[in-house]
Image (tube, helix red, strand yellow):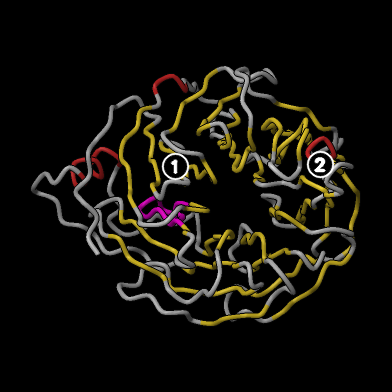
Amino acid sequence: MSLFDPTVARLERELKHARPLIGCRFDPFGRFLFVSAEDDTVQRFDLLTGTKTAFAGHSSWVRGLAFAASKSAAPPGAPKPVTMARAAAGLGGFAVPPPKPFTFVSADYHGKLIWWQGGADEPKPLRTVAAHDGWARAVAVSPDGLTVASCGNDHLVKLWTSADGTAIRTLVGHESHVYNVAFHPDGTRLVSCDLKGIVKDWDLKSGKCGRDIDAKVLAKYDTGFMADIGGARGMAFQADGSAFAVCGITNVSNAFAGVGNPAVVVIDWKDGKPKLFKPKDAFQGTAWGVAFHPSGAVVAAGGGQGGRVWFWKDDPVSVHAVTVPANCRDLALSPSGDRFAVAGSNGSAYVYNLSGTGATAPPPPKK
């Protein structure tokens, strides 16, 4: 594993939108940051040019964001990070290369999935699929880019062909809302986590659940409000497939107000044993996004009592934290691991540089 020093993280840029943000993801090549907002749109920020482009087609909030593209191929003329920084600063002598085509899939609270051409100048929905009865909470794309998985409030996990949205299979077994899905890096299995903190490990060839994994520390029934709170608000695999992480809220004392503490559960893939990771600092709120850095470090973002991003190495207590200017509602790690972004409740996406090269001011977003 490579050396990793989270203390060098510096705010690189703030990307502003008029409405609070819900989700964020980098495209497979790290050129764009996609954010979803409470105005039912997805906004694409070009990190090279500063251009802001709206993806309009949903009629409810979007939380699920995923991409179908070959991760083995680099886009033609892809700039190195330092060149990206020079371009963002408006320095001359740089021709902006066209983006490589990739498919973008978004999932909304009305249960719909929409396919888009992610790099289009004037994006229009390619197809819309009525996927779930109730919220479609998350969407993921298989490592080979051929299959889309979605999950939602109808207790179901569904598989679709990424090429045309044809239904492949429905995975039945959860008894509560399904909050998140993620493909194992080898492409043969899928994990999903529901409101009660039950993680199911699915064999994609047979469509059968091979085992249930315990992440129930991220769930609670509040007897006072007679309500459940929990679920995996974020989910991610380590690149080698040896572990995966789910994040959310624990120690809940008030389900209605979401009073509790953020937590990450890291699960060993081979034996299914969970390990609870907590922030070192006292913090009230929820962890809304989690990722594995290429070094193996765990990164998570949370919101509630302000915004925070935490880092863990080998110990279940965080080794560093970054305070963010707004409650974090999602976390995205760039493909190279040199940057991370958070979606802010104030309408801003914050991009942080992890390379230690310092911050660069981008040009104002263009509409």
Please identify the quadrant where the N terminus is shown.
Answer: top right
Q: Residue 329's x, y, as percent?
A: 54, 45
Q: Residue 342's x, y, as percent?
A: 47, 42
| Mark 1, residue position | 341
Q: Quadrant of residue 39?
A: bottom left
Residue drawn where x is 47% and y is 79% of the image: 125
Give left or right: position of 116 versus 248: left
| Mark 2, residue position | 219
Task: Determine whether 27 is above or below 241 in the image.
Answer: below
Q: Residue 182's x, y, as percent?
A: 69, 53
Residue drawn where x is 40% and y is 53% of the image: 33
Residue at disc 1, secondary structure: strand
Please identify the quadrant where the C terminus is shown.
Answer: bottom left
Q: Which stretch did the figure color magenta?
A: 25-35
Q: Earlier in the sequence, mark 1 or mark 2?
A: 2
Q: How far apart are marks 1 and 2 (CA)?
A: 26 Å
Residue at disc 2, secondary structure: strand
Type of amino acid at the residue the image marks with label 2: Ala
The crowd level at tag 1 (other Cα within 10 Å; few <14, some 14-19, many 20+) is many
Task: Determine whether 124 is above or below 39 in the image.
Answer: below
Q: In which quarter of the image is residue 140?
A: bottom right
Q: Nearer the viewer, residue 93 or 277?
A: 277
Q: Is residue 148 magenta?
A: no
Task: Determine whether 80 is above or below 8 in the image.
Answer: below
Residue drawn where x is 82% and y is 48% of the image: 228
Q: Which mark is residue 246?
A: none
